[in-house]
Image (cartoon, rainbow, N blue to C red):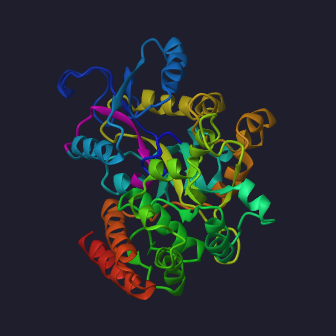
Amino acid sequence: MRWKRAAGGALLVCLLLLAGHASAGLRAGGEPGAADGRGPLTLVTGGDLTGYLRGVLDGWNKRHPREKVTLVELPDAADEVRAQLVTELRSGSDRFDVLNIDVAWTSEFAAAGWIAPVDGRRFPLDRLLPPVVDTATFKGRLYAVPYVTNAGLLYYRKDVLDREGERPPQTWAELERLAKTVAPKHGLDGYAGQFLPYEGLTANVVEAVQSAGGTMLGDEGARVTVDSPAAREGLGFLLDGVREGWIPRRALTFKEEESRRAFQNGELLFLRNWPYAYPMANADSSAVAGKFGAVPLPGPDGPGSSVLGGSNLAVNAHSRHQRSATELMAYLTSEQVQRQVLTKGSLPPVWADLYNDPQLIRTFPYLPTLKRSLLTAKPRPKSARYDQVSLATQAVVHQALIGRQDPREAVARLTRELQAVVRRG
């Protein structure tokens, strides 16, 4: 998706702010935190690269002249968006009405009291993909509503595998064999994901661990569970790949775009990336247009499990216009708008039925594969200190990748670092 740099966003983060920039004491509407307050809103987005939101908001504004939404864009980078959000929310400001936050931030923002619980009866949750709804909950309560989703896919060179009489891999062993034997015959590197130390590396690590049946944290961040045979197997898949060379060392500098370009330029046999890469790799200017396919990520014994990317809509706990904000959230998660999210924004929607629409599948042929990946995907570790969990994961695993540590050493160190985060929490 276009909010890909958050790993999923990589991922589009839209923040809905009250229109105008007057101080809180001069704002119209109810008291801060008033559930029935109404008033104008402002939508702030981190990198609306397709510009589709303006059209979506025009539809709202025509029907709600007293609650119009103005679009404002924040910097494109996820960490900058989060930093600006945290600064405002920590101060108790009511400047923000609705936050369309990265799914990984939902538990952190809920635990801090920055976002208000949501009444799920106001939204079509039963029409949404079930794993996606899970990203919006914390400690058994709904704190947000899914808006855009995402899951990792394995891109592969169909033309190369066809010439070799091979099928796309469903297991790590099959991927490793093909990356070691077939890729060099065709002058290609074997496999790459996003291995620079940033949120994308966290996503790749969590996918490997959970595909092997392991977890990083339990009890929504209260307990460290990464010290397990499954975690060692998952990390071993990545560490062995670099050590043995079928993951090229240059991939340790890859984020989403660097890895996409490498595949699109015809340099890789396999690539883990988000769905946004599909239409770009199939463009007329691409060296692999019409020559590749996409399947769910492999695991140890069959298809693996992706992390869920995307963004959730949440209401600022201090908003004066919570009723208007909630109704705007309902509009943005309606089937009509969710269809536009896909067709005009090129972003994976959260409505399950859209993935079965024959007309949409003709335009977006990867939808059935993406739906399979989404239905087996899981949220990133839920924690009130998710930012620290992610930073620790990135630091430990990247050092292991470049230092060629074995999986046991890497898991032991990661366990110690995560335990320190949990104690500080």
Total numbered labels placed on residues in the image? 0
Left of 392 or right of it: where is 183? right
Residue shown at 31% from the left, 48% from the top: 79
Answer left or right for 214 relative to 324. right
Residue 211 included in the magenta stretch of the image: no
In percent of width and height, residue 330 lies at: 55, 33
Q: Residue at point 74% right, 61% down? A: 161
- From this viewpoint, is residue 10 visible? no
The quadrant holding residue 250 is bottom left
- In this view, the residue in front, 399 or 65, is 399
- Residue 57 placement (x, y as % from top left): 49, 21
Image spot of residue 275 (x, y percent): 60, 47
The stretch in magenta equals 91-105
> Any magenta on residue 99?
yes
**Residue occupying the point 33% across, 82% down:** 413
Q: Quadrant of the C terminus?
A: bottom left
Dividing the picture into quadrants, the one containing residue 334 is top right
Depth check, front residue: 241 or 385? 241
Question: Where does residue 163 sit, x and y in percent of width and height?
Answer: 78, 60
Q: Closest to the observer: 241 or 378? A: 241
Using the image as rendered, state which of residue 146 and residue 278 is in the foreground.
278
Q: Is residue 139 above or below residue 260?
A: below
Q: Please tell me whether residue 277 is drawn above or below residue 298 in the rendered image.
A: above
In the rendered view, does 126 fall on the left or right side of 221? right
Residue at screen point 54% across, 82% down: 233
Residue 30 visible from this viewpoint: yes
